[in-house]
Image: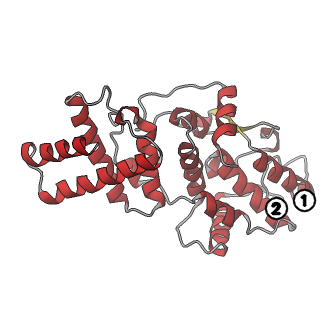
Amino acid sequence: MDRLIDEFISYISSEKGLSQNTTQAYLRDLTRFYAYLKNRGLEDIQKVDEETIIAHLAELKTKNFESSSIARALIALKVYFRFLKRENFIERNPAYYLDNPKLWQTIPNILSIEEIELVFKKPIIETEEGCRSLAIMEVLYGTGIRVSELVSLNLYDVSDTFLKVKGKGRKERLTPLGSRALLAIDRYLNCFRSLYDSEEEKALFVTSRGTRINRIMVWKMIKQYVKLAGISKNISPHSLRHSFATHLIDNGAEIRVIQEMMGHQNIGSTDRYMHMSHSKLQEAFYAFHPR
């Protein structure tokens, strides 16, 4: 691998005429990427795929790298793998479709698994508000749904295995529910939602007045518990959605399965949208999601 990097650096400095600063920046990006591969026991560059690169970039985000640094790392990897493919060092270019560095500039801060545990321990589940708060956070992190989708959920959208979600364009999808999310929902239904059982209000998550909860309330609630956990990151409901995706990727889930779970029709890091069966979604969820 050192030989490949040496040849690449020679190529971009002598043939492409890149500045010394740019060359050194690319070298740092590649050294960091190879350290990531080594830590995961991936020694064969031929086995690197899109998911590997995306997981590496997501890890940089968790380590608080600047968005501009992550975008540059993506560009460095694209140039590097294009060089390897042209020189026949690899059979296919895994970075070919990762053609939107701006994608990584828009990813919000995410929580590590350890930070998730800290935050989720803060709601006092013996209280009505606490059991509702935990249920909301478990659903957001356990399914990866958008906060707009969460506040639109109705009681009849929950089953013992799936959550029926209305996404963008009113398109429905089913996303698997893990045991912790199900337990939190069940506790909430018994300790909070049952107090506001009426024919008129079908919302799953309601306020203390029995009306449908809104996005601002969810945003404030998450901010509160993140602060109580002593975490200084700027975390939003969308951060739990991206934490969901990042942790699945880190544990080996396929990016296209995650796209289906999250309701993505198109994403710059993949070549096409691939429909997965509900059984495949459930299998991937239970195999890879940490909760």
Q: Residue at x 40, y 43 (%)?
A: 53
- Quarter-of-image position of residue 278: top right
Q: Is the residue under label 2 in contact with that under label 1 (CB below 8 Å)?
A: yes
In the image, residue 82 above or below residue 135: above
Q: Is residue 19 left or right of residue 93?
A: left
Instruction: Kindly identify which residue carries mark 2.
Output: 131
Distance from Cα at disc 1 to Cα at disc 2: 7 Å
**Residue 124 % position (x, y):** 81, 69
Q: Residue at x 82, y 44 (%)?
A: 155
**Residue 146 % position (x, y):** 61, 48
Instruction: Kindly identify which residue carries mark 1.
Output: 191
- Quarter-of-image position of residue 122: bottom right
Q: Is residue 59 left or right of residue 94?
A: right
* Amino acid, disc 1: Cys
Q: Is residue 78 left or right of residue 116?
A: left
- Can residue 208 be seen by looking at this rendering? no
First in sequence: mark 1 vs mark 2: 2
